[in-house]
Image (cartoon, rainbow, N blue to C red):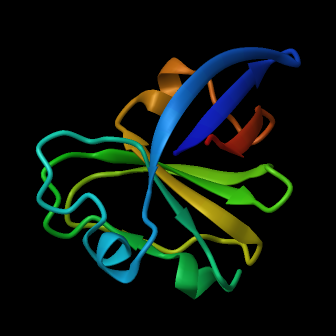
Amino acid sequence: MYELVIYNNKIEQKHIKLEYASNFYKRLIGLMFKNTIKPLLFTQKTSKRHFSSIHTFFMKKTIDILYISEDNKILEYVTLPPWKMYIPKNNQTKYIIELPKNTIKKNKITTNTTIEVVKRI
């Protein structure tokens, strides 16, 4: 189990539990065909931007996406409706987190937000 920890003025503000796309099948299916969006973490083996692209084909709902560097910096974020594709602008992505729509807005997440991706045992 992983968690996304969001900080506000260096004080822990929110913890979001993340499911982990740990194998090929989970990475392939992701959130496709799901009625409920549960936050999902992907780790990238390479930081090349085309390998970090996301699509929402066969998805029923709009999602928020965070692109995060190895040092837990938010590189960029996007809200993506069903049947779209997005290729990030950067080559430094280590983590991609797919979240329910409006999670970014509700938590006031920007590229300046301090976050941490934490593995919980």
The residue lying at 77 percent from left, 72 percent from top is: 92
Left or right: where does residue 115 sit relative to residue 11? left
Left or right: where does residue 41 sit relative to residue 112? left
Residue 54 quadrant: bottom left
Residue 48 quadrant: bottom right
Decide if residue 73 is in sight here: yes
Foreground residue, 57 or 117? 117
- Expressed as whole percent of the image width and height from the top left, the position of residue 61 reads 19, 46
Tell me if residue 38 comes above or below residue 48 in the rendering: above
Give the number of callouts.
0
Q: Which residue sits furthest front?
A: 121
- Expressed as whole percent of the image width and height from the top left, the position of residue 112 reads 81, 36
The residue lying at 51 percent from left, 75 percent from top is: 87
- Expressed as whole percent of the image width and height from the top left, the position of residue 23 reads 41, 76
Foreground residue, 108 or 6? 6
Tell me if residue 1 comes above or below residue 48 in the rendering: above
Residue 85 quadrant: bottom left
Decide if residue 104 is in sight here: no
Tell me if residue 99 comes above or below residue 106 in the rendering: below
- Expressed as whole percent of the image width and height from the top left, the position of residue 73 reads 80, 49
Left or right: where does residue 102 sit relative to residue 58? right
Tell me if residue 94 comes above or below residue 113 in the rendering: below
For the C terminus, give its image quadrant. top right
The residue lying at 56 percent from left, 60 percent from top is: 96
